[in-house]
């Protein structure tokens, strides 16, 4: 039973709306002065109450609930609370309607209140007995994941209310369960008026997150990532250069000694035929010394180039280098600039 009007013929409903609107106006005018409402607030509340009664008569329950709620926020009165509860009954929002009727019973009416307020308390008690059997009860639990978040129709369920019977409006309810590290679940349940349902939800754990391998550096000739084979080549080249340096030094020293001997045996640069073999040996040593120093320069140059071309950390580039070879009689020098 939403209102006394439901027992009256359709033709008498406009009359009841007029009488109810007048009663609401009277209740608002006699509201407790402790709220210190302004004249504009009281006038607005009267207009909202009248619109609410008209919407309630037209069974436009959503509009009626909105108008009574707004009016009560401006000027609190049990008549407005009860009629808001009636609108919620029409919307089948039984849980909220019950709370409106309970509020009126808890607050009661002060001494000297208008008769309409006392009548509102009686109506609230009767409507409360009517709505209680229509409330449904829903139990949702996630036993394996205590930290799971549960939502019913988008509204989060407090932890204290998880796993126990919770007052719920009847109809099709959507349950969402989610938790860190688990796949979310979504299910629906149909609750009849006064019915009860329980759902135990099992969540499936997500696979452990794997750390992605850093992307490999782009490979290009002479760039980072290509130095793995350059180091051994540099070692070999530097070894060859060292061997050439040793050969050039030893043969160079021997060539200098042979030259000193020939200088003693060949005054003024004239050598007898008996020194032909010594002269040829001096030339061979000189050629071997030159070849050794040449090999030393080539090997050292190659080794240095390959050594500088090895892999470097990302973002680091080798400084440009220049190698210059200086040759002079009896010596060879390698100069590098960076």
Image (cartoon, rainbow, N blue to C red):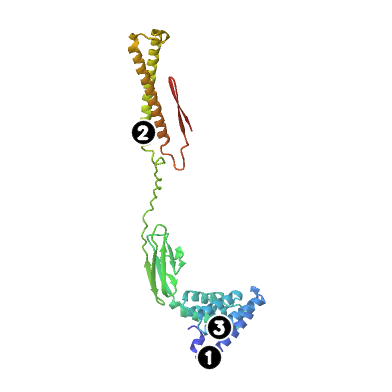
Any part of residue 305 in sight: yes
Look at the picture and state if 220 lies above or below 137: above
* Location of residue 244 by image quarter: top left
Look at the picture and state if 300 lies above or below 158: above
Q: Nearer the viewer, residue 234 or 46?
A: 234
Residue most extreme to the right: 39
Q: Nearer the viewer, residue 77 or 112?
A: 77
Of the two numbered discs 2 and 1 on the same chain, state the one appearing first in sequence: 1
Tell me if mark 1 has few (under 14), some (14-19) or many (20+) residues whose alpha carbon lies within 10 angstroms of its own: few
Q: Nearer the viewer, residue 56 or 101?
A: 56
Q: Position of residue 104 (x, y in %)?
A: 54, 76
Residue 53 - label? 3
Q: Nearer the observer, disc 2 or disc 3?
A: 2
Q: Nearer the viewer, residue 338 or 82?
A: 338
Residue 12 - label? 1
What residue appears at the point 39 percent right and 31 percent down from the top-left corner? 302
What residue appears at the point 48 percent right and 78 percent down from the top-left corner? 91
Badge 3 element: helix
* Location of residue 34 by image quarter: bottom right
Q: Position of residue 118 (x, y in %)?
A: 57, 81
Q: Position of residue 215 (x, y in %)?
A: 40, 48
Callouts 2 and 1 close, C-beta under 8 Å: no
Q: CA distance from mark 2 to mark 3?
A: 97 Å
Q: Give the left or right position of residue 51, taking residue 138 as reference.
A: right
Of the two numbered discs 2 and 3 on the same chain, state the one appearing first in sequence: 3
Callouts 2 and 3 close, C-beta under 8 Å: no
Of the two numbered discs 3 and 1 on the same chain, state the one appearing first in sequence: 1
Q: Nearer the observer, disc 2 or disc 1?
A: 2
Look at the picture and state if 306 lies above or below 255: below
Callouts 3 and 1 close, C-beta under 8 Å: no
Badge 2 element: helix
Residue 233 - label? 2
């Amino acid at each position: 039973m939403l209102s006394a009007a439901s027992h009256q013929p359709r033709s008498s409903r406009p009359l009841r709306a007029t009488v109810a609107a007048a009663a609401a106006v009277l209740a608002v005018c006699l509201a407790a002065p402790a709220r210190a409402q302004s004249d504009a607030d009281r006038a607005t509340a009267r207009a909202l109450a009248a619109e609410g009664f008209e919407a309630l008569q037209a069974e436009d329950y959503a509009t009626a609930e909105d108008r009574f709620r707004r009016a009560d926020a401006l000027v609190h009165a049990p008549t407005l609370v009860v009629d808001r509860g009636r609108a919620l009954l029409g919307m089948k929002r039984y849980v909220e309607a019950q709370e409106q009727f309970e509020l009126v019973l808890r607050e009661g009416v002060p001494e000297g209140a208008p008769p309409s307020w006392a009548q509102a308390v009686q109506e609230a008690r009767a409507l409360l007995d009517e709505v209680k059997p229509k409330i449904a009860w829903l139990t949702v639990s996630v036993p394996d994941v205590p930290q799971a978040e549960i939502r019913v129709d988008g509204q989060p369920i407090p932890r204290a209310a998880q796993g126990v019977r919770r007052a719920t409006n009847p109809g099709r309810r959507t349950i969402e369960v989610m938790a860190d590290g688990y796949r979310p679940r979504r299910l629906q349940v149909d609750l009849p008026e006064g019915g009860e349902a329980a759902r135990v939800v099992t969540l499936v754990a997500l696979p452990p997150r794997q750390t992605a391998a850093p992307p490999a550096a782009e490979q290009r000739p002479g760039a980072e990532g290509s130095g793995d084979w350059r180091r051994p080549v540099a070692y070999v080249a530097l070894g060859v250069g060292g061997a050439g340096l040793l050969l050039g030094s030893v043969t160079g020293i021997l060539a200098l000694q042979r030259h000193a001997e020939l200088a003693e045996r060949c005054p003024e640069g004239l050598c007898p035929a008996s020194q032909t073999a010594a002269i040829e040996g001096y030339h061979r040593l000189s050629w071997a010394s030159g070849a050794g120093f040449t090999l030393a320069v080539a090997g050292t140059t190659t080794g240095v180039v390959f050594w500088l071309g090895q892999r470097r950390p990302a973002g680091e580039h080798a400084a440009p280098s220049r190698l210059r070879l200086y040759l002079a009689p009896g010596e060879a020098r390698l100069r590098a600039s960076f």
